Image (tube, rainbow, N blue to C red):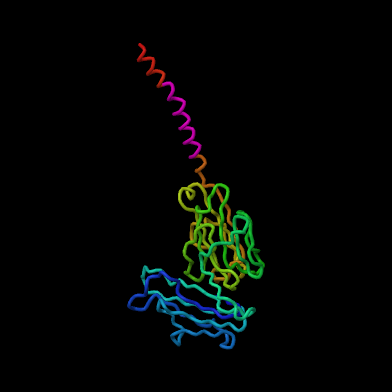
Amino acid sequence: MMLDAGVYCVFHAPGQTPPGRSGLPGVRITRAPGVSPDVVEVSTFETDGWMGSMNGAALVRVHQGPSGVMVTTYQEIGSEQEGPRLQVMRLIDSRAEGGEATELPSGTPADKAAVGDVTAHVQRQGDVNCQLGDWVGTPGSQLWIEGFSVNATGPLKTDDVEYQAVLGRGWLSPWVEGGKFCGSRGMSLPILGLRVRLKGEKAEQWSLRVSASFTDGTRLGPVDGAEDALEAESLAPLEGFRLELIPVEGAAVEKASKKESSSRKASSSPVRKTDKRRTRRQ
């Protein structure tokens, strides 16, 4: 992950299943390859950067940013236990020494003042609001997206949609409900892709098509957002994406067929009732 200049605490998100006897799953936090110790310092309870314990944490000081920090996760082969989930807390902003700590985990409620169906926090631009069907972020801009939220309107309700952010290879954030923010703001932590899907009966009537652009030039989609997450092979940061709401083929025909069948039943009922009344009079 890329961090701007400052001091950060990286720790395990609460509520996870503890490691087994082997100590796995676990995490190791180190400087990214090629990053000098004068640029990034990593301090952990273990000298090798291991964060296997659920109480483990790492203190990261970035003197010159943005600079890379390598997060490596370890799991037992064949294990069904989910991988470690981490949170990042900014303790000191180099631009405002002594500032209050800011915690921005996945699932933080989105800004209530945001207008539009999709809100994304873009590097050096802040929150950007767009409608479904428009590009969020700018393909080719080299400005990564740090997080996003989806506030569905029209035929959908906000709680009909949920989404995830790609944080690393094989590492996705937990599912976040519509209307809530997934990612971070102002921490120079790019997301590396996304997955968006509909829930319940709306998933049978509509499909969310997702297209994505990445800082290495990779373009993916449009594909059904309920399938695998969109991410570049190089794991380059996400710089733009588009969500398109498409009716599921056959859903409209089925709906019309049910309506026609209901109409036929309604028109035939009075005739049967009239015949019964005539029989009684006779």
Q: Main secondary structure of the magenta part?
A: helix
Task: Locate residue 69, reporting x and y percent.
Answer: 54, 79
Task: Locate residue 20, reporting x and y percent.
Answer: 34, 75
First to last magenta residue range? 254-271
The residue furthest top is 282
Residue at 40 percent of width and 76 percent of height = 54
Task: Locate residue 48, reporting x and y percent.
Answer: 45, 86
- Residue 114 to residue 190: above or below: above
Residue at 50 percent of width and 46 percent of height = 205
Examine the image and state in which quarter residue 208 appears.
bottom right
- Residue 54 to residue 245: above or below: below
Q: Quadrant of the C terminus?
A: top left
Relative to residue 279, is residue 30 drawn left or right?
right
Number of residue marks: 0
Relative to residue 40, is residue 269 drawn left or right?
left
Q: Nearer the viewer, residue 95 or 244?
A: 95
- Residue 165 to residue 263: above or below: below
Q: Quadrant of the N terminus?
A: bottom right
Residue at 56 percent of width and 60 percent of height = 149
The residue furthest left is 21
Examine the image and state in which quarter residue 148 appears.
bottom right
In the rendered image, residue 260 lying in the magenta stretch gets the answer yes
Q: Nearer the viewer, residue 59 or 2?
A: 59
Residue at 52 percent of width and 49 percent of height = 206
In the rendered image, residue 243 lying in the magenta stretch gets the answer no
- Residue 201 to residue 17: above or below: above
